[in-house]
Amino acid sequence: VTWNDMLDNLRQRLRRTIGRDRGGALEPARSSPRLEQLGDRPLATPAADVYENDRELLFLFDVPGGSRDGATVVWTEREGLKVLVRSQGLPQGQRWASEYEPADWYRAFALPDQADGSKAVSAIVDGVLTVRVPKRGNAAKLVPIRGT
Amino acid sequence: LPGLAPAVDVYENADEILLVADLPGVASDALKVDLDNGELLLEATRTGDSEGRMVESEYGDCTFQRRFALPAGIDAAKVAADLRNGVLELHLPKAEALKPRRIEVRAG
């Protein structure tokens, strides 16, 4: 059994556990180990807003033209949060005026320790990608003590 | 709200002029497209539902506005706007009289 087989197996089990399609609602972040290789077009950095409250961190990314099919959101403990969104192709016809070039959107953020990236959920609506990362609970837990 | 001019590409083919504008975060009911006396006005507003303290801001709520002078010969009645995934495609069909036509040559 190779390392890749083990990874594939783990990925399939994760997919079964988490479920991918929840009818457009917020869904768990998808995982892909080959994020940077997905884009064959130039990469552009999307503008981002980040909010924080007691429960979660909220990331908003401007990705006009991006849809759910072309979006990948990855979190790893070591590298943090990465998002990649493929842009749409250009229309046909003679171009008179051009202010943007086709590029894929890519951005990465390191997450603070209290953010639990494994429970992140994301959604893409009207060309805005939203990623919500909940914070780990800080409730005190009584540790049992064995012995006499 | 701060005002921004959205990035726009303009294309032309035999049938129409196509205007493509980046309007991320704008829902269709928050977009206004006005065509008046040869002038096209795009106006849109986006407002988010964020909660909590702002940590980093590059995006934010804003209004998008842009104005264009249109060439003569646009069929105003057939202008169609399509907003999908934060990108507006505005189709401005040319009037029949301006479309290229092939003239048949009759043999004498």
Image: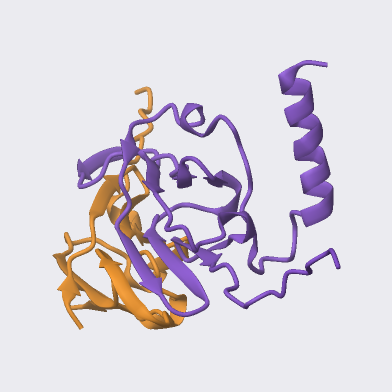
Residue B96 sits in quarter? bottom left
Chain identifier, colour orange: B
Looking at the image, which residue sits at the far top?
A: A2
Between A69 and A91, the one nearer to me in the picture: A69
Query: With A62 as the anchor, is A6 left or right in this view?
Result: right
* Numbered circles on residues, count: 0
Q: Which residue is at a point 21% across and 44% down the rendered structure image?
A: A98
Query: With A29 as the anchor, is A127 left or right in this view?
Result: left
Identify whether A40 is placed above or below B52.
above
Residue A3 sits in quarter? top right
Task: Residue A76: give x, y in percent of width and height.
Answer: 55, 43
Query: With B74 as the anchor, is B38 left or right in this view?
Result: left
Quarter of the image with the C terminus of chain A in it: bottom right
Can residue A81 be seen here? The reply is: yes
Can residue B38 be seen here? The reply is: no
Q: Which residue is at a point 26% across and 50% down the rendered structure image?
A: B9
Between A24 and B94, the one nearer to me in the picture: A24
Task: Residue A34: give x, y in percent of width and height.
Answer: 56, 29
Between B57 and B87, the one nearer to me in the picture: B57
Identify whether A134 is placed above or below B16.
below
Task: Residue A121: give x, y in percent of width and height.
Answer: 60, 62
Identify whether A68 is placed above or below B101.
below
Task: Residue A65: give x, y in percent of width and height.
Answer: 43, 53
Q: Which residue is at a point 82% across and 53% down the rendered structure image?
A: A17
Chain identifier, colour purple: A
